[in-house]
Structures are given as structure tokens and as C-alpha cells.
Amino acid sequence: MAENLMQEANKLTVLVNPKLTEAAALIEKAFVQRRTLIVAGKCHVNYAGRANSTLELGERLLIIKEDGSLLVHRPVGYEPVNWQPAGSVFHVQSKGDSIEVHAVRQKPRESVRVTFDEVFMVSALSLRDSGEFLLHASEDDMHRAILLKPSLLEEGFKPISYEKKVEPGFVDVYGVDKNGKLVVVEVKRNTAGKEAVLQLAKYIDAIKSKANRELRGVLAAPSLGKDVQRLLVTLGLEFKALDPKKCAEVLKKAETTKLEAFFNEKSQ
Amino acid sequence: MAENLMQEANKLTVLVNPKLTEAAALIEKAFVQRRTLIVAGKCHVNYAGRANSTLELGERLLIIKEDGSLLVHRPVGYEPVNWQPAGSVFHVQSKGDSIEVHAVRQKPRESVRVTFDEVFMVSALSLRDSGEFLLHASEDDMHRAILLKPSLLEEGFKPISYEKKVEPGFVDVYGVDKNGKLVVVEVKRNTAGKEAVLQLAKYIDAIKSKANRELRGVLAAPSLGKDVQRLLVTLGLEFKALDPKKCAEVLKKAETTKLEAFFNEKSQ
């Protein structure tokens, strides 16, 4: 049960239950050294910028990253209650019975003041991170993305069904274009080759006999094999470039609607 | 330069440079006690859900809040690289040379696996926060919000100018409605009284003599004083309820466009 103790290691400096002046000193040092800073404590927050807000006293995490981005997190909710993008200038000031961390941005002029009455922990970390972030989507994800956002395929496209059974198999996505023509879509996750073109042609043939409307066959894939372009044209089919990553983003967007709504509605 | 040391205090337990098994034990304990957990370390992340993603090895912060929301933060950027809203179920598992924190949600089915090869710090905090978040807007903020989002006033409203000089003063917002009528808007931050109504009437009189179009006078304020409703009607003026908080949100929304764009485009 040690109190008021500093621990230093290569990666980090941690202060537990520091005096306010000690906390201020480490915060200042973290700013100078451009380290990632975490301050846990009892604080209130004032924001002034395009709008103004006040967050009453409570126990929270303040995170300031090496690029100057700032987050204030309450103990619940995945959204920050206050935040600033990179590019703020920071100051910390001891004020007797409190310390004030002040972040100022110039364009637009914005100011966040986080005033701590108590500090439970200060942690200054040197983090190295060059790992890549990779987004994936399966063919099934790509189908669902088209249903969620049909303009991925083309403007005015309206899906009717999904994995529709059409002998000899299942049509990936089936819909109507802005001119009322039926559209049969075959989706491929990778470069579409001869096989994909012939598969689509089969579906078109099978549906043509039943449909009394004009029919288009669209092969949607990240790219088209060079040698199949002529075959595609000969068979009267079309190619639409569809990026699996873009599809993954559309799906994830649906998921993050709540988060966006938060940033729209509650904001700072 | 103490290493591998645990500190306990009322509010928090902190482990610096723990062994992986010690880190896992404190993480587990934090889940059980529903404390706010911060893990700083070298990790890779796998997400599977509506889309799939991989984040390669790097040094980051994992934050899991008492409500089960999860954030993975890289050392730059105000946006999390991975996140989950509240409601996940968590497990931590030691795997010899790594520990895996696994978060699973059911609706929709989503899974985030954060695998740490090294842990620099684990901090488990009990934070109490009932402070209210209050958003403010000045009268000037309210003017700007109408310019940014004219539908705050009414559908089809198009602002022409802002703080337009019209003897005996300045018209707050001046525009055209969907029927082509000129609209003079007087904005008040608080309940609009007799004075506000008479001020608007003066502007209308001053402009009427010059304009050759139909003219409407609109008083926009959070509420209208009971005793001035009759005066307003007599003078042929209108009242529109305009919430300063809503205006502040519109302004802040403009500010957070980049953040929204991030969540739309990069997502998990």
C-alpha cells in the first residue's frame, strides 16, 4: 500500500497519488518530451470554441498523445466527453489546491481547460507504433455492403433480393437500375477471371427466359483479369470495380452509427 | 528505478513492468470488480464482426471501462483504432509468451482480441463520476448556427446576410423563405420579452419602406414571454422556438466533421 511513489522504467514514468505539484511537474515534462500522458483524477472541464461547454466535477481519465490530441474519458461510454484533434499547445499550471491543464488550438480557436482537484495517477509513456491497420471483407460482406449502400454498385441501383436461387445456383445480388432494367450482380472478392464471367452469363441466360424486362449482368470485383475483358464485352456483360475494403467500411459504418450520432448530437 | 512493482491505493491498483501472468491476474480482477482498466503494452489486435480487421504489432493503450466499452488507442490521433460499445463480455488468458484479452459482443456478433507480447503498465481504477455535461451557446453562436444549418429556423430558409446594418441597429439574420418572402430574424438567447418584439418591429418597419417584396419578421428564442404573445400577433410577427443547446450542437458538429469522417471511412 505504497503512496506517493514514482516508478521509472524505459517506457514509462508513473506517479501514484502524487502531490499536485509533483503531478504538474511530470505532466510538464511529458509535454516537453512529447510522451503519451495519462492523468487519472478528479477534475472539471471547460471548453470554449465554436460552442462552449462545462463538465462538472468528477473522476476521469485525461489522455494527451504525443501529437497533441486530447481526450477526456468518463468511467462509462466509449465516446470521449471532451476531445481535441492534434495540434494543440499545452500548459500546466499549479494553482494551490488544483492544477490546470490548458490546451489551446488556433484554427479554429478552441480552448480546453481540465482542472484537477485530486490526481490519482500520472503516467507518461513513450510508445512506438508503426503497425499497419488492415481491413478485410469476405464476398458475403461485399454482398451485404451493396444491400446497405446500393450506390457502391451504381447510383440509382435498388436491390430486390440477395442470394436469390436461380438454377444453376444463387445470384449474389439482384435488383433494378435507375432506368428500370433488371440487374444481376456477381460479386468476387479477388480479380475476376473467365470463370466468374461465364458464371454470370449462365445466370443471365437462366433469368432472360423468365424476365420480360431488359436485363443487365454486372460483375463486381476489385479488378478484372486482362484476358477476360473481351469475353465480357462479347457476352454483353459489364464490369464494376468494387473494393472489398470499401465494403468493409460501409459495414462498419452501419455499426458505428451510434457513435456518429453521439458526435453529432452531444458533441463537446 | 523500481521494476515490477504493485501499488495499491483506494482508487487504483497500478502494476509497472509486470510479468505477463501478473498482468493477466490484475486484468481479470479488474473485470470482476468492474473497474476502469488501462493496459499499456505491445500488442496486436484482431477484430471480427460486420467486417474484419487486423492491427499489426505496436505499442498502444487498451482501455476497458466499467460498462464494458473498449478502446484501443495508438500513440497518435484522437480516434481509437479499435473500439466496442458497452456490453461486451471479457476474458483474459495467459498464453506463455503473451496474454490475450478477448471481448465478445452478441448483437451484432463481434469479437476483439488484443494480444500483448509485453505489458508496460496495468492500471485498475475505481472512478466515480456523476458530474453533468452542460453545453452553452451565446446569441452570436445562435446566429452562426442558423447560417450553418438554416433549417433550424424553418425548412427552405436561405440566409442572405448576418448582422446586417439596418438603422436603428443590426439585423441578426436576414434571408429568404421557401416562398421567396424576405425574412428578418431577431435572435434571443433567453425568453423573448416585449423589448425583443418591439426591436424586431422596428427593423421590419425600416426595411419595409425599401423592400418591394413581402416581409416576415421572426423572433427566434428558446421561449416567448406569456404577456407578449398578443403584441407579437398584433404586429404581424412570428415566433420560432430555437434552443441554444441545439445551436451549440450544430456548431460543434461542424467542428467534428473530421472525426465523423474518420468513423465513416476508416472504421474498425
Image (cartoon, coloured by chain):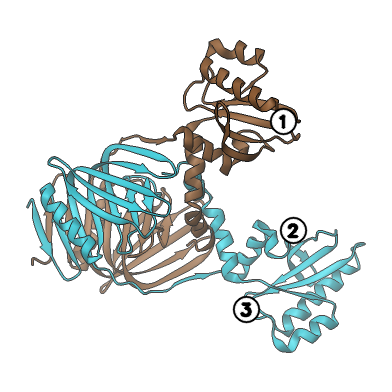
Chain colours: A cyan, B brown
Badge 2 amino acid: Ser
Extreme residue in the bottom direction: A227
| Residue depicted at x 67% and y 37% | B157
Callout 1 secondary element: loop
Q: Nearer the viewer, residue A248 or B96?
A: A248
Q: Nearer the viewer, mark 2 or mark 1?
A: 1
Residue A166 point in image, percent of width and height: 79, 67
Q: Is residue A91 above or below residue A134?
A: above
Are there few (<14), some (14-19), or many (20+) residues within 10 Å of tag 3? some
Q: Quadrant of residue A44?
A: top left
The residue under label 3 is: A190
Question: Residue A28: which numbered mark, if any?
Answer: none
Disc 3 sits on a residue from what chain?
A
Q: Horizontal placement of B235 versus B44: left or right?
A: right
Q: Quadrant of the N terminus of chain B?
A: bottom left
Q: Is residue B120 above or below residue B146?
A: below
Q: Are marks 2 and 3 in contact (CB under 8 Å)?
A: no
| Residue depicted at x 70% and y 32% | B182
Mark 2 → mark 3, Cα distance in angstroms: 23 Å
Q: Horizontal placement of B116 versus B193: left or right?
A: left
Badge 3 amino acid: Asn
Mark 1 → mark 3, Cα distance in angstroms: 64 Å
Badge 1 amino acid: Ala
Question: Residue A161: which numbered mark, if any?
Answer: 2
- Is residue A1 something one can see in this rendering? no
Asked if badge 2 and badge 1 are on a common chain, one would say no
Callout 2 secondary element: strand
Dot placed on the residue nearer the N-terminal end, 2 or 3: 2
The residue under label 1 is: B211
Disc 2 sits on a residue from what chain?
A
